[in-house]
Amino acid sequence: MSTRIKDEARILDTSERELVEATHHPALQAASQSDLRDTLGRLRERRDRAQALASRARRNARRGGGFDHDNSGMRQKAGLLAEAVRRLNKELARRKAAERRAGLQDNAARALELKRAAGRPERPGAGRTRNRGMQPVESDKTRKIGSSMEAGRVSQFVRDAQAKRDARG
């Protein structure tokens, strides 16, 4: 839940108020990335300190020693600082997403330029297709080398020569 500016001025001291004012809309978008990171670090330190003081006071009140009041001012301060941290985190995430989006757009534009520069690819023909009427079909059989008569004559010659060698030996 957002808090009114009057309540922020009432709860925070001047240095904390300046930090929190830097997290509101017009100043938030005008700030640079490094300024946002510095502000975020200082806000986290202040928030952690306020939370530690509030929990210490609550712990002392529970034990019965020390403070007897509810310490709501310190808890409100911690809450305001936590809201400011959330606003800064959200703005940093938004800027990071915008950078990523711009990077993707640049990469896509570069890829399109490369694709257009490459031209159309060479594609092989489709081969046999339908609807052309009767076409001769190429044979898938391997072609014979020489005639079958010649193959028989050669194999018979080799057989006879081997028989002569066997007979000599």
Image: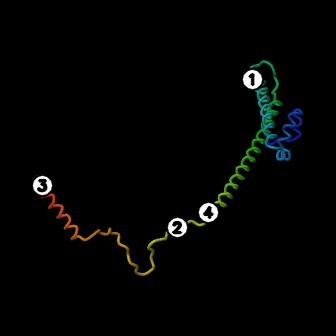
- Tell me the residue at 40%/81% (across/down): 134
Crowding at mark 2 (Cα within 10 Å: few <14, some 14-19, many 20+): few
Asked whether disc 4 touches disc 2, contact meaning CB atoms under 8 Å apart, the reply is no
Looking at marks 3 and 2 on the same chain, the residue that comes earlier in the sequence is marked by: 2
Residue with the mark numbered 3: 166
Looking at marks 1 and 2 on the same chain, the residue that comes earlier in the sequence is marked by: 1
Crowding at mark 4 (Cα within 10 Å: few <14, some 14-19, many 20+): few
Q: CA distance from mark 1 to mark 3?
A: 113 Å
Q: Amino acid at mark 1?
A: Arg
Looking at marks 4 and 3 on the same chain, the residue that comes earlier in the sequence is marked by: 4
Q: Is residue 163 left or right of residue 134?
A: left
- Tell me the residue at 89%/39% (across/down): 6
Q: Quadrant of residue 36?
A: top right
Q: Look at discs 3 and 2 and give the one toward the viewer.
A: 3
Residue with the mark numbered 4: 118
Mark 4, secondary structure of its residue: helix
Mark 1, secondary structure of its residue: helix
Looking at marks 4 and 1 on the same chain, the residue that comes earlier in the sequence is marked by: 1
Residue with the mark numbered 1: 59
Using the image as rendered, state which of residue 117 and residue 88 is in the foreground: 117
Q: CA distance from mark 3 to mark 2?
A: 61 Å
Crowding at mark 1 (Cα within 10 Å: few <14, some 14-19, many 20+): some
Q: Amino acid at mark 3?
A: Asp
Q: Is residue 145 left or right of residue 162?
A: right
Q: Quadrant of residue 68?
A: top right
Residue 66 on image: x %, y %? 80, 19
